[in-house]
Amino acid sequence: MSIIDKFVHSMTLAGACSRVLFLDKELLVFPLLSLMALCGVFGGLFGPVVATGGLEGLMAYASDPEQVMNDPAYWVVLFILYFLCFFVVIFFNAALIYCAMIRLFGGDPTVMDGLRSSWRVLPHIFAWSLFAASVKLVLDFLASRSDFLTRLVASGMGMAWGIATYFAVPVLVVEEVGPISAIRQSASTIRKTWGEALITHVGLAAFHSLILLIAFLLGITGSTYIETQPAIGVSYIAAGVVIGLLSILIVTTLNGILRAALYVYAVQGKLPEAGMFDETLLRDAFERKR
């Protein structure tokens, strides 16, 4: 399959996901809630620093990377930040994937269905967030080392981690298992299907990058008008911000729907009952190892 074929294939899959989203526009609520909660996390952690006038000291501290990397307090704070972010993202991703599965099997999900599902597996989400934050911290620590080989190993481990955990959230939602079992089942699902090189996100990522580029160009254009024609400048900037945020919400939702559909097909070996995905699309979403 050529690069162009992969891109076209990914766009076709995105179109199938968009039909699910068209039927359940409320699925956009989950990434929106996730984004709002993440803003709350960062506000809660760094808001007091800004409020107490400690921003200047924080910037001075961050200006010496070597000192920062050798400070245990930095890694403790980073772990807390990673844990909270993982918890928020996984909680709402799990809700999104659960609702997507309801739709794929012919149901009509609500936002509360998804939230109740995530609440039901809250202990597993908590455990997974701790585990994922620990792995991320170790990878970051290795990547912060000065030697090239260590950074290369960390990069490879990060890629392997991303592949192995691709189906971790669907496994948490469906099987209600802990992090180790989720990783094992996720990796097994990928191995026993069609390979490890996922190509579908290439198209979605390209589409998202294009939209973000348009939003960025609108913002740049607006900034050139700020001094001479403020109203026009603000309009361009506002349009760029809105387009950028909408693209994040839509692409995140499409990714969740896609992951749910691929998981159903990978585990059960059959199409979702809603009939929105062609079997060839799902089968070719993974590139078979040679």
Image (spheres, rainbow, N blue to C red):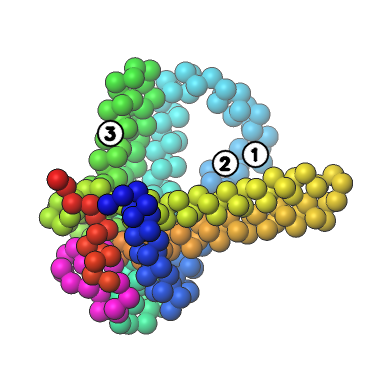
Span shown in magenta? 261-277
Amino acid carrying label 2: it is Phe
Distance from disc 3 to disc 2, alpha carbons, whole Å, reads 32 Å
- The image's mark for residue 156 is 3
Check if residue 178 falls in the magenta segment. Answer: no
Q: In the figure, 2 relative to 253: above or below?
A: above
Q: Name the foreground residue: 93 vs 271.
A: 271
Amino acid carrying label 3: it is Gly
Residue wearing tag 2: 46
Q: Name the foreground residue: 2 vs 173.
A: 2
Q: From the top left corner, tell me how far across and down residue 160 is, in percent.
A: 25, 40
Picture quarter containing residue 273? Answer: bottom left
Q: Earlier in the sequence, mark 3 or mark 2?
A: 2
Residue drawn at (14%, 45%), measured in percent from left and top?
Answer: 290
Q: From the top left corner, tell me how far across and down residue 20 is, in percent.
A: 39, 74
The residue carrying pointer 1 sits among few (fewer than 14), some (14 to 19) or many (20 or more) residues within 10 Å by Cα, namely few
Q: Are marks 1 and 2 in contact (CB under 8 Å)?
A: yes
Q: Name the foreground residue: 267 vs 131.
A: 267
Picture quarter containing residue 193? Answer: bottom left
Q: From the top left corner, tell me how far across and down residue 140 is, in percent.
A: 37, 32
Q: From the top left corner, tell me how far across and down residue 128 is, in percent.
A: 29, 51
Q: Nearer the observer, disc 3 or disc 1?
A: 3
Residue drawn at (83%, 51%), measured in percent from left and top?
Answer: 230
Q: In the figure, 11 relative to 165: above or below?
A: below
Q: Is residue 249 left or right of residue 214?
A: left
Check if residue 269 falls in the magenta segment. Answer: yes
Residue wearing tag 1: 50
Distance from disc 3 to disc 1, alpha carbons, whole Å, reads 37 Å
Q: In the figure, 140 relative to 258: above or below?
A: above
Residue drawn at (27%, 52%), measured in percent from left and top?
Answer: 1
